[in-house]
Image (cartoon, rainbow, N blue to C red):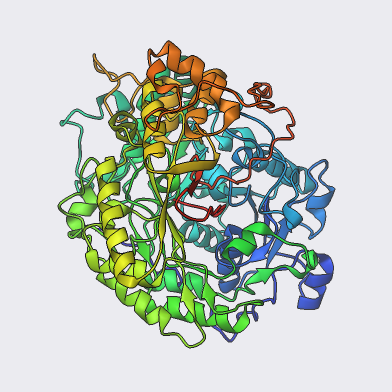
Amino acid sequence: MLTAPHLFAHRPDRSVRPKPAPFLPMSRAEMDRLGWDRCDVIIVTGDAYVDHPSFGMAIIGRLLESQGLRVGIIAQPDWSSAEAFRVLGAPRLFWGVTGGNMDSMVNHYTADRRLRHNDSYTPNDEGGKRPDRAVTVYAQRCREAFKGVPVVLGGIEASLRRIAQYDHWSEKIRRSVLMDSKADMLVYGNAERAIIEIAQRALAGESIREMTDIRGTAIMRSGVPEGWTEIDSSSIDDPTVTVSPRAPGADRMVVRLPSYEQVSADKVLYAHASRILHQESNPGNARALIQRHGEREVWLNPPPIPLETNEMDGVYDLAYARAPHPVYGDARIPAWEMIRFSVNIMRGCFGGCSFCSITEHEGRIIQSRSEASILREIELIRDKTKGFTGTISDMGGPTANMYRLACKDKETESVCRRPSCVFPDICKNLNTDHSSLVQLYRKARAVPGVKKIHIASGLRYDLAVRNPEYVKELVTHHVGGYLKIAPEHTEPGPLGKMMKPGIGAYDEFKRMFDKAAKEAGKKLYLIPYFIAAHPGTTDEDMMNLALWLKRNGFKADQVQTFLPSPMSLATAMYHSERNPLRPVRRTGSEEVQTAKGLRQRRLHKAFLRYHDPDNWPILRDALKAMGRSDLIGPGEHQLIPAWQPVGATAKPRETGPKGGGLKSTAKTGNVPTPSGKGTTFLTQQAGKGRRNTGPRR
């Protein structure tokens, strides 16, 4: 099993470490008050600076501060010139550049490439405070501001664009962002280990360009160094080249992906490269990857080693102010408002849903905090967060109920290459016992001053049904009116491409949920989420989903079609119309039917809102073309009526050009999370309509 030095092994002696700053400085005046003549590291971010462990710039900034370094923040700078990047002077060690908690293109545009007018990570929800492709633009301005200072990229935009990737907004394959930005290094995934090693080696006088062996980083090289064995990805399934990670020489092997030029020209090779990238994602057995871009090579070192529990505790126990920087005054920052009373208890997700980018970024191995650390944070919220009235809004993570779940055998975990621990079935080696989570819930509820704890993170119901005690605990104490879960679809075809369980698992969970609610004397509702136009979804699949919604009394409030976020498996399906989970270089590789045209994507979206009169004309046309005119009429078994109310319209809205989007007065009503999932908001006719714009996983 791989090990790494403790995350805080380099922490300097407290007698010489500077006292933590109230907030990391954003101005020269703040630096003067702290007695700083310059910063060691300056972090440039596309988000407003909120000093809280739910924001990447705060975690990395406070972590570097714990190493005795002076860290400044430049948040949402004016990128029209380099002037705003000179406000804190030149950093002594390096620039840290991030687009923020979301990919800037996902932040700016809808799945149909229409411009969004709001930004939850900006004061007063104002849009337009970050550029398109923020990482590349910021890196360019940093180099202009102070030539010769190294630039290190990080955050989700850099992480998900670390190799050649399909870009939905330009409809083409883009180069690695490391190439486009001309940065010195890219840090992907959870960056704590890498950023500390970079800082410590830079302090020792080593050039960042010489740091070629740090896990979780990408660098540029001219070729494969001497002493390394190169494996062509086309032979990756050959048992003669499958080498145990503990075999002699395994740590000096690199897998060559098809080049940028090849994947740009050949969609099948793009799907193949996507499959290899995901296969080489287990820190226990992943090999380095290399991909040629013209005359240069993008070299990906293996993924970072996950944090241990005490290391996670150390990250969350850093000296956060737990508030937005005072420069914002009374401005409302929606993303902060959403999480200010919530607690993150874990990282990672082993679900492997093909449309989700969490596993590409945080990994499949669950990293959990200790009970003591979580309870301390609840007490901090109670004592120091303005406006706390006794309710914790969420206690979860990427998935609410994966806390402390892991492979039963570390040796097995270190060699596993399955893309999911729960698809097509739950792995026999996976520990699914929720008793630690039930115990945590009970202890958290017992914290003095806490009246209620809601669970708002997405729930993995196929795991929950194995734990009746957990379902009862959840429903009895932690559901306030409704609980959101994500079956995503009802039909086997789309669910198989999504790597999600069949709708039977949802039915079983609903039965247990309703039974527990009745026993608790509570009237509660499940709010299921669905995705329209996911790769592998036919018009008939969407029709059947609409019929299921009607039978179960659901009406969608707002919906979003599948958004091809960078580097996800579903995006590879969307672009290549092949399934990357199958060896695509072999004869008979699986083709994937994909809704790409605007009209078909609009139709799939309309099926989710079958009750909206504006959608009836397009649905009537589609049902007639499908030979299902029997579903048009007034009957309970029919989907839409034959009549049209006065004033209802179904005018198509124009989308923007490739690479951008026309301004639209249409409000999207929600902001997608970094996972890139489509979202569906539902109101159940039997109960009160609720809308929730929080993140789900």
Q: Which residue is drawn at 39% across and 63% down?
A: 307
Q: Residue at x 42, y 32 (%)?
A: 546
Left or right placement of residue 159 versus residue 473 in this view: right
Left or right placement of residue 517 versus residue 415 in this view: right
Q: In which quarter of the image is residue 352?
A: top left
The single residue placed furthest to the front in the displayed view is 634
Above or below for 47 versus 653: below
> Percent from the top left, x then y, of residue 50?
66, 64
In-front residue for pair 425/273: 425
> Percent from the top left, x then y, of residue 621?
50, 15
> Percent from the top left, x then y, of residue 683?
50, 48
Above or below for 184 versus 383: above
Locate the N terminus and report the quarter of the image it occupies. Answer: bottom left
Q: In which quarter of the image is residue 375?
A: bottom left
In-front residue for pair 232/337: 337
Residue 494, visible in the rendered structure: yes
Left or right placement of residue 60 versus residue 623 in this view: right
Above or below for 646 versus 463: above
Residue 10, visible in the rendered structure: no
> Percent from the top left, x then y, of residue 3?
31, 62
In-front residue for pair 407/339: 339
Q: Residue at x 47, y 29 (%)?
A: 607
Q: Which residue is drawn at 75% across and 47% down?
A: 129
